[in-house]
Amino acid sequence: MSNDRLIYLPLGGAGEIGMNAYVYGYGAPGKERLIVVDLGVTFPEMEGSPGVDLIFADVEWLEERADRIDGIFITHAHEDHVGAVGHLWSRLRAPVYAREFTAHHAKRKMEEQGQNPDNVTVIPPWPQTMTAGPFKLGFVPISHSIPESSGLVIDTPAGRLVHTGDFKLDPTPLVGEPFDAVMWGEIGASGVKALICDSTNVFSPNPGRSEASLGPEITKLIQAQDGMVVATTFASNVARVKTLAEAGVAAGRSVCLLGRAMRRMIEASVETGVLTDFPTVVSPEEATSIPRGNLMLIVTGSQGERRAASASLSRGKYLGLTMAEGDMFLFSSKTIPGNERGVIRIMNAFSEMGVDVVDDSDGLYHVSGHANRPDLEQMHELIKPQMLVAMHGEHRHLRAHKALGEARGIPGVVAPNGTMVDLTGDRPVVAEYVEAGRTYLDGSVQIGALDGVVRDRIRMALNGHVLVTLIIEDDEPLGEPWVELRGLPETGSSNAPLAEVMEEDLSQFLGRAKRKTLADDDKLEDELKQIARKVAQDEIGKKPEVTVVISRLTA
Amino acid sequence: MSNDRLIYLPLGGAGEIGMNAYVYGYGAPGKERLIVVDLGVTFPEMEGSPGVDLIFADVEWLEERADRIDGIFITHAHEDHVGAVGHLWSRLRAPVYAREFTAHHAKRKMEEQGQNPDNVTVIPPWPQTMTAGPFKLGFVPISHSIPESSGLVIDTPAGRLVHTGDFKLDPTPLVGEPFDAVMWGEIGASGVKALICDSTNVFSPNPGRSEASLGPEITKLIQAQDGMVVATTFASNVARVKTLAEAGVAAGRSVCLLGRAMRRMIEASVETGVLTDFPTVVSPEEATSIPRGNLMLIVTGSQGERRAASASLSRGKYLGLTMAEGDMFLFSSKTIPGNERGVIRIMNAFSEMGVDVVDDSDGLYHVSGHANRPDLEQMHELIKPQMLVAMHGEHRHLRAHKALGEARGIPGVVAPNGTMVDLTGDRPVVAEYVEAGRTYLDGSVQIGALDGVVRDRIRMALNGHVLVTLIIEDDEPLGEPWVELRGLPETGSSNAPLAEVMEEDLSQFLGRAKRKTLADDDKLEDELKQIARKVAQDEIGKKPEVTVVISRLTA
């Protein structure tokens, strides 16, 4: 009898929101054929990853098994699902599959990293399917906040898996396919082994609202304005951009798109046919000569990103356009936890200009792209899976989602990144734990999150940096040690320059030091470090990072 | 005729939430006698102020006029109102006045910074008043989220000012005085020149709820639990701590307070008589031997602070106590914008332990300490001021609050930190702008926010740090330059160690360099920096901070 097994292994996206990367495998234990679903990024922040450019899942486990990967499947074109394809592809070298709009973005990601975009193949939607090793897969249209989002139906020798990707139940999404409950019901009716399901909004108690509910409210809001209207949302939320643009036009305004991502996303949508009737827009240059009361800008930067159009406008001029008293700025978006400071900074800058800021606190101008708790229950009911794997969420979301399924009698599992789950039997069983970490793109180099580079940067930021240089000739100090400070106050409690106080104490030590100490670089460095730190503690109440450079001369 | 004027000058707290510091003055322009209301702190964060310990208003303007300060008045004992008293007192040296509970904290702040606590005088509440220079002041009890909060009635030769401090309209605050609308109405009835009013919750559209509304809900929640119950709130919210403790006792549990601030605040409340009937508590040691189902902990750390009891419990054991599957953790608090990441980190850590986390998303377990929009309108109505100064809030709050007053015909002003407003006439007039910045407490040293120390730390965090050392003897390099890296990847695109590639390029440059360059420290340093940065850009795609140390020997 076969001991082949069906496994699920999240390497990113489970136990966090971001950098999605899921692995499925089928075959003899340790020899499974593998597929990868999504390769996304997470964005760095000053607190934990200062100076880092992008973060993605550590794919070392996959890289070691690259010869067993039969394909990389991208569910949709959000950065946290497709953003790492170009960066990680050379380590995995498997064919990439996606629907047309998503493939358009995946190809660009490949090109930007010098990879051949022909490695990305466009797959038509369900009911079409394709084969990859022991898997038969279909991209099933599902509503979300970007065009052509797809769930995956993955038929395996051990049964059918349904991987939802990110989704909501929207019968009127405006752009992209409506949620088709009948089709999903049919997919479920053939018997589903496991539902691997988005958990993001499990704490939202009310049914999700449709994209179509926003248009009338936004139009009303714009019509009430006399000055210029500026609205921001995620560039990839093409339906929202369209809603905003149409509301602007309905209110008699010319519409201008600002921000590279915004223009690129709309162009890609038109090019791939997902967007057919977007209002005519004017260029930023044309916009400068249109009366404020007749103009609407739709701009990037809903999360307060420093370089986006919103932040630029909040600091002053952007492409010749400026905000002025009496204008309105609309956040048609939700602030992602952690981005509050940046968003509030922009709100206050606009307030200083006399601009009225409207956000979603009334719940009228934004809807989420993820399924809320009752919607998740509906999905469970449609698919009727044998087991539930809570996916795409922080640990608390996964845990609550598992409990939601179990309340309906569906056995579930909380499997954070690195948890390999065996789906072969009647219920999910944790098979093993795999090392799953983060890879930082730092400039042009990929480094491990735990290899110390970023830790050292954080330490310098918290503690400052002291440089001690010393020349030693024939085991005797030549001249005095030299101290340079970086990121430290110049003067401390003794009112003398901190560097001089340090040099003085270091010199005294060197005068007393035995020849044996002076001859031993490690020991000497260690002693000098301790002295520098002690002086700093006494003078400024802080223990800085210290780097000692000893140059040895021989006469 | 006198040209004396009445001025208002916020140095902190206006245009931000935190580090409150307000100045009032009366007298001939430039010779006004001054009083200070509140001297609070703001807390640093990694993004803008890494390594900083505390932030307070820059009081240089006040320090230069210290001989004209007739008193420092503290409205209540929150850190953002009293926290800087000890740190700044030696620069101002004016008597400090507060009610008893607040004075208790102010005295401790003085002692902690080596100042004489006798400089703090306890003032009984309104209708008692005291004189300070041209001002007659009374501390008027007002409800907030800490005992003995007070507004100030400030009678001046130019008319009466009402400075609300932080407040809400709570008829049943449980601890401390209820809001007394009759008394405030009487204060308003004598004619008020200006209402200087808390703006924090101007965007909250519904009337605020009373502290008393929480008890029944929290009791119900605790009664439904089988495991240990842990709840967190601000330690200074003594009424809430009492509500939580009483709910625990009502549910048949022993109550234990964890966290130094929590115990200290309750002790101070009992000592100063503001808290008379707090339930008996058990020590952490006793708690370890109480069955989980009979135990409730009330702990510090509602904002996710890394060193507080909540965060410690989320990482493992704290004073012998641990969380376990089936326990419940209640955030009886609101997350202050910017603290989301820390709070979510704790929530997920508890989720991993199988602990159920309950927060205030249902609106049942927390009420705000600030007046909402309708409450502000009620205050305007009670006081009927000639003019409104929006205080205590970010710029957007101040602006909306001014608009709220103007909608009722009260002329107002948005005066962010540094805006001196002349209140003498019929309406507020901006008189001048004063330099108003931030002072960082960095270890034991006070530094200016803009003096470059913290900027250098941020740069090292973002870019890493390269140290280049070079010995020059008689204008010729002695040996090779030496490179040390800190916070940078060791290897870049050429697969050779980055430090070695840099040393190689630096050496080549030195070989080519003219004697004139080698003799000029500034020029040489600049050239070496440029080369090191260029190599880094080529190798790792990043331009680091570079420090060059040149040691010159003469033979």
Image (spheres, coloured by chain):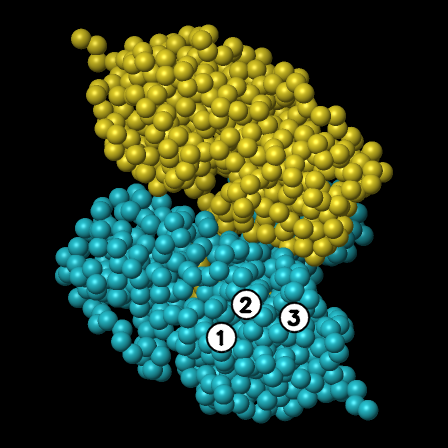
Chain colours: A yellow, B cyan
Which amino acid, mark 3?
Leu
Identify the subunit bearing mark 1: B
Mark with earlier residue (2, 1) = 1
Q: Provide residue B188's location: percent of width, then percent of height.
A: 58, 79
Find residue B239 and report its image quarter.
bottom left
Which amino acid, mark 1?
Ala
Q: Which of the two residues, A118 or A67, is positioned nearer the viewer here?
A: A118
Q: Provide residue B329's location: percent of width, then percent of height.
A: 30, 53
Mark number displayed over residue B388: 3
Q: Residue furthest right?
A: A289
Q: Residues within 10 Å of mark 2 (few under 14, many from 20)?
A: some
Q: Provide residue A51's location: percent of width, then percent of height.
A: 57, 44
Eye-nearest disc, 3 or 1: 1
* Number of callouts: 3
Mark with earlier residue (2, 3) = 2
- Separation (CA) of disc 2 from disc 1: 9 Å
User: Callout 1: helix, strand or loop?
Assistant: helix
Query: Disc 2 marks which residue?
Result: B378
